[in-house]
Amino acid sequence: MLFSFSGIVKKHLRRGTMLGFPTANIEVEPETPEGIFVGFANVDSRRFQSLIFVGKPLTFDEQDKKAEVYLLDFDDNLYNKKLEINVLFKLRENIKFSSKDTLVAQIKEDERQARDYFSNFSKMEL
């Protein structure tokens, strides 16, 4: 495991949902490493494979650092719940995209890589 953090899921702009990737938004400490990661989100004693963004949403010119956690194969309300995040692997750095379309294409590729990561290891190894 690279690092972990936790926080309460807050309602934000719902941009991830509009882009097709609903995320749980969590405030993070300034020293939390930035990038796009693969890991687990733990909520209500359940563990979910996740794609994790930590940083400033540069494509949308936002200045506040946050975590946006996309729980793979999950469809439920997480608002006001505590998430514990275990980060396993860094996929890439945070970059600014020229359009929403290029961002969505990259998120799809990130999701593919995350699913590949999880499919290549047994639960015992993770």
Image (spheres, grey):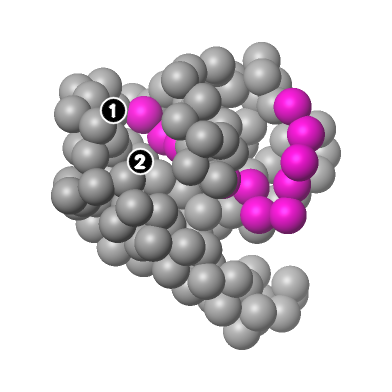
Q: Quadrant of residue 36?
A: bottom left
Q: Residue at x 55, y 45 (%)?
A: 21
Side of 107 where 85 appears, left or right: right
Q: Residue 94, relative to residue 110: is it above or below?
A: above
Q: Which mark is residue 54?
A: 2
Q: Position of residue 97 (x, y in %)?
A: 21, 50
Q: Are marks 1 and 2 in contact (CB under 8 Å)?
A: yes
Secondary element under disc 2, as helix, strand or loop, is: strand
Residue lying furthest bottom: 120
Q: How many marks?
A: 2
Residue range in magenta is 66-77
Asked whether 124 or 118 is in front, the reply is 118
The amino acid on which the numbered mark 1 sits, given as a three-letter code, is Lys
Disc on res. 65: 1
Q: Camera-side residue: 126 or 117?
A: 117
Magenta stretch containing residue 107, yes or no? no
Classify residue 108 as left or right of residue 43: left
Who is closer to the viewer here, 8 or 113? Answer: 113
Up/down of 11 relative to 34, above or below: above
What amino acid type should be assigned to the residue bearing mark 2?
Answer: Val
**Image coords of residue 92 (percent x, y):** 29, 63
